Amino acid sequence: MAAAISTTLSHHTSHAAVQRATHDPKWVRWTLTGIALLFLACFLALPLAAVFAEALRRGFGAYFSAFAESDALASIRLTLLAAAISVPANLVFGVAAAWCIAKFNFPGKSVLITLIDLPFAVSPVISGLIYVLVFGLQGWWGAWLMEHDLKVIFAVPGIVLATTFVTFPFVARELIPLMQAQGSDEELAALTLGANGWQIFWRVTVPNIKWGLLYGIILCNARAMGEFGAVSVVSGHIRGETNTMPLHVEILYNEYNFVGAFAVASALALLAIVTLVLKTLVEWRHAQARKS
């Protein structure tokens, strides 16, 4: 009896100690929460509110007229075109790279992982200068491109290349740890049951990585539409031809067209908010799928 009482008291004592160690006092929780909310208000909510307030300063008529200009429409089309090409390209590359890294051991594997992370470490401006060095008029292939009447720098191909370069790690970096954690047991089981490589990929691999894949695509698309540095270097800032939405914002702001600049900037902010909502939905669905 004494032993049972001693065990019960010891259990309650240890439980109370765990509660004290894992539950901070209310003033600590409220202080940390207040600091976090204040930080978000100062550095996120207020700047976003300022963008929309400035964009709507002269009313909705002036706001929507900023998107009716031919240069603004051209920048929107070019932004969507660059994203429509770079995101699928990075999707294919990301899946292939993640498959190779997670499923196979080969010489140069660590080098491939390092190269995938390169755009995270290199400034976007430097990546743009790399393409100027290679494809520019005085670059390595500049003379050959001129002879064949091909244009990369200060044209759409250069913008697509620069966008693809700065965004290609996103899909791969989401899939690599996911596929490494899952291992190859299910693929090997499907192989022993007679499935071919294509069937294994579509019926085993893709269902296992679909949420990580969607997450990577969302982040890749957001970065593609908002990229400024690399695109600025290779675009040449030709109005109506090589200006994406971020570059169009810069031009309008430099011309003191603040309403137009903030109107286009608000569209980019809305795209970012939609991206965050989609990201949250994907994370929620992934959590629900794991519970089930």
Image (cartoon, grey):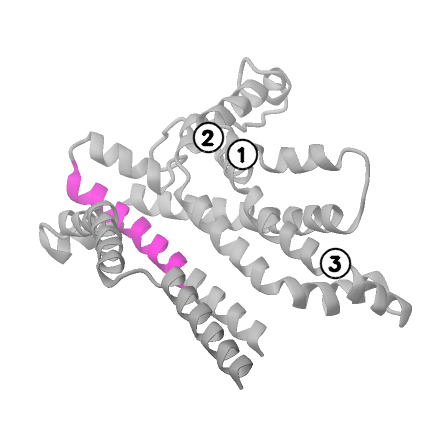
- Chain part drawn in magenta: 257-277
Drawn side of residue 292 relative to residue 228, left or right: right
The reply to whether dot 1 and dot 2 touch (C-beta < 8 Å) is yes
Q: Residue at x 54, y 49 (%)?
A: 87
Q: Earlier in the sequence, mark 2 or mark 3?
A: 2
| Percent coordinates x, y for residue 33 in the rendering | 26, 57
**Considering only vertical position in the picture, is 2 above or below 278?**
below
Q: Which residue is mark 3?
A: 183
- Mark pair 1, 2: CA separation: 7 Å
Q: Earlier in the sequence, mark 1 or mark 2?
A: 1
- Residue 119's mark? 1
- Mark pair 3, 1: CA separation: 27 Å
Q: Earlier in the sequence, mark 3 or mark 1?
A: 1
Residue 64: image quadrant is bottom left
Q: Estimate how packed mark 3 is, as few (under 14), some (14 to 19) or many (20 or more) residues with alpha carbons within 10 Å.
A: few
Q: Nearer the viewer, mark 3 or mark 1?
A: 3
Q: Which residue is mark 2?
A: 124
For residue 100: magenta? no
Q: Amino acid at mark 1?
A: Pro
Q: Residue at x 68, y 57 (%)?
A: 181
Q: Secondary structure at mark 1?
A: helix
Q: Estimate how packed mark 1 is, as few (under 14), some (14 to 19) or many (20 or more) residues with alpha carbons within 10 Å.
A: some
Residue 226: image quadrant is top left
For residue 270: magenta? yes
**Considering only vertical position in the picture, is 284 above or below 155?**
below
| Percent coordinates x, y for residue 150 in the rendering | 58, 27
Q: Amino acid at mark 2?
A: Pro
Q: Secondary structure at mark 2?
A: helix
| Percent coordinates x, y for residue 188 in the rendering | 84, 63
The reply to whether dot 2 and dot 3 touch (C-beta < 8 Å) is no
- View extreme (top): residue: 138
